[in-house]
Amino acid sequence: MRVLIVEDERRLAENIARSLRETAGYAVDIAFDGEDGLYMAQTNPYDLLLLDLMLPKVDGLTLLKKLRGGGGEVPVLVLTARDEKESIVALLNAGADDYLAKPFDLGEMVARSKALIRRGKGHSDAVLKVGDIEIDTSSLTVRRSGELVVLTAMEYRVLEYLAHRPGAVVSKTELLEHLYDFNWERFSNVIEVYISGLRRKLERGENKLIHTLRGQGYILRA
């Protein structure tokens, strides 16, 4: 999953990014003002936006309104030092999905981020199930028929993304855009390497789970 943080407090933004990368395994981009944040949100496919309210150039509420007004549907978690009821109501009415008042616990921030991403993709349970595969998005672990399957960090991220869209064709480009941050290097065969590793560790005999549609992408289905 790929997350955009729009926060002008650099130390806080970097701490949030570190927590999301290390705890949830997400790819993270950072914008330090509302103008850059709005541009990045409108031109990249993010799975979550963490948005500060008090931003230079374009404030958070204006950014949110422009994003929603332009059809942007990415889940938005607002980070605000304001606790007035009127401000919170305005945020929710403008299209925010949730908010956290500063200062906040980083563990709670990560948990809320995971929940918003799951709901944004149509899942309410922390455990994603496809056939006899169980993907626990809280502990970042995978089991097949109850047995733990040890994956690399990137193998897990590819599998989790596919599991959020079971039965749908997911292109290689889509995987790259959602699993790497703004500075990712475009190695042509990196996704194929991770798919090969997942097949080797998850599939048994003729019981295929990850199907390739030549020239289109991959499908995860039981």
Image (tube, rainbow, N blue to C red):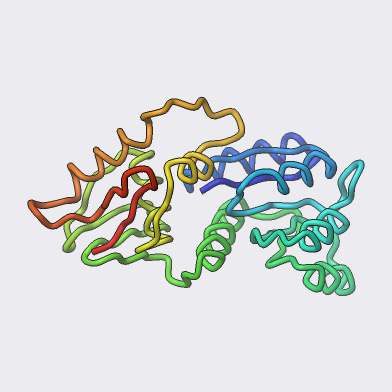
Q: Which quarter shows the C terminus?
A: bottom left
Res 195 quadrant in image = top left
**Position of residue 125 measured from the top left corner of the image (x, y, whole percent):** 43, 71
153 left or right of 174 in image: left
Q: Residue at x 69, y 55 (%)?
A: 104
Res 117 quadrant in image = bottom right
User: Residue 147 versus residue 130: which sits nearer the camera?
Assistant: 130
In the picture shown, does residue 9 fall above or below 216? above
In the picture shown, does residue 212 fall above or below 70? above
Q: Residue at x 41, y 28 (%)?
A: 188
Q: Residue at x 46, y 70 (%)?
A: 123
Residue that extends furthest to the front in the rendered view of this protein? 215
Res 79 quadrant in image = bottom right
171 left or right of 213 in image: right
**Position of residue 33 measured from the top left corner of the image (x, y, whole percent):** 83, 40
Label count reads 0
**Position of residue 154 measured from the top left corner of the image (x, y, whole percent):** 38, 39
User: Residue 114 versus residue 101: which sits nearer the camera?
Assistant: 114
Q: Residue at x 30, y 33 (%)?
A: 193
185 left or right of 137 in image: right
Residue that extends furthest to the left in the rendered view of this protein? 205
